[in-house]
Image (tube, rainbow, N blue to C red):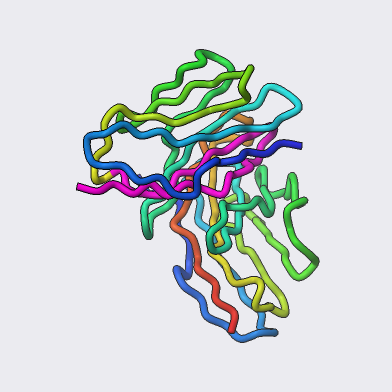
Amino acid sequence: AQSVTQLDSHVSVSEGTPVLLRCNYSSSYSPSLFWYVQHPNKGLQLLLKYTSAATLVKGINGFEAEFKKSETSFHLTKPSAHMSDAAEYFCVVSLGSTLTFGKGTMLLVSP
Amino acid sequence: GAGVSQTPSNKVTEKGKYVELRCDPISGHTALYWYRQSLGQGPEFLIYFQGTGAADDSGLPNDRFFAVRPEGSVSTLKIQRTERGDSAVYLCASSWTSETDNEQFFGPGTRLTVL
C-alpha cells in the first residue's frame, strides 16, 4: 500500500518570503512522487516529479522538492512567494499507473 | 493545443437519477483516468483505461458506477441511481501511456450535485 500525508492543511506566507509545504510518503517500494497545483476553477497542473534520478527536483515557477528516503519526505519549497502562487497543492505518490493524492495544502499569500 | 475537456462542467440531478459524464482526452493519449474529488479532499482514483479496455477499476465504489471508452478516445463515466454522497467533482486525466512516470494531464472537472 502507498500513501502520502500532507502535514499542513493551510500555510500562510507573505509575498517575498520562503514557502515550505511538507509531505511524507509511505510506500513498500521505490515510489514516484509528484507535486500538483490546483488553482481555483482550473485543472490540476504538474509542478514537478521525482522518479529515482536526482534527489533534488526542480519544477516550474521556481518550485523545487527534495526526496529524502531516510525521512520518507518530499517537501516542496520556493525561495520567494508570489501572489500568483496562492492555490492548493497536492503531494502525490505513484507505484503503478494510478496516482494516490494527499489531502492537499492550501497556500495563502498575503501582500 | 487542446487539453483534456470534460462536459458538462456542472451537473445537478435528483437522488435516484442516472447521469453520464464525458471526457475528451488529449489526442493521441492512450491512457485515460477518472478520479473523484470530494470537498476538502484530494482526488481519489476510480478507474483507468489503456486503449479501449479498463486496465484497473479497483477504485469504483460500487456497481452503480461504470465507465466505457469504446473507441479508445472519448470516455463516459456512468452513475446509476445517484445518491447524495455521489456529489463531488469528477476529474478526468490522460497520458501518452500508462507507465508510472508519465505525466497525467487533467481536465477542469465536472461538478456533480445530487439533491
In the rendered view, tell whether residue B39 sits above or below residue A69. Answer: below
Could you tell me what secondary structure mostly forms the magenta stretch?
strand
Residue in the image at 76% along x and 70% along y: B64
Q: Is B89 or A103 nearer to us in this picture?
A: A103
In the shown orientation, is residue B80 left or right of residue B26? right
Residue in the image at 54% along x and 35% along y: A23
Residue in the image at 59% along x and 79% along y: B114
Residue in the image at 27% along x and 36% along y: A81
Total labels: the figure holds 0
Where residue A76 sits: x, y (%)? Answer: 44, 31
Q: Is A7 or B110 nearer to us in this picture?
A: A7
Where residue B66 sits: x, y (%)? Answer: 72, 64
In the rendered view, tell whether residue A86 sits above or below residue B80. Answer: above
Whether residue A91 appears in magenta in the rendering, the answer is: yes
Quarter of the picture containing the N terminus of chain A is top right
Where residue B3 sits: x, y (%)? Answer: 41, 49
The furthest residue to the top: A54
Q: Over which residues does the magenta segment extend?
A: A85-111
Where residue A31 sits: x, y (%)? Answer: 65, 26
In the rendered view, tell whether residue A45 sits above or below residue B81. Answer: above
The furthest residue to the right: B63
In the shown orientation, is residue B1 left or right of residue A33? left
Whether residue A12 appears in magenta in the rendering, the answer is: no
In the shown orientation, is residue A58 left or right of residue A94? left
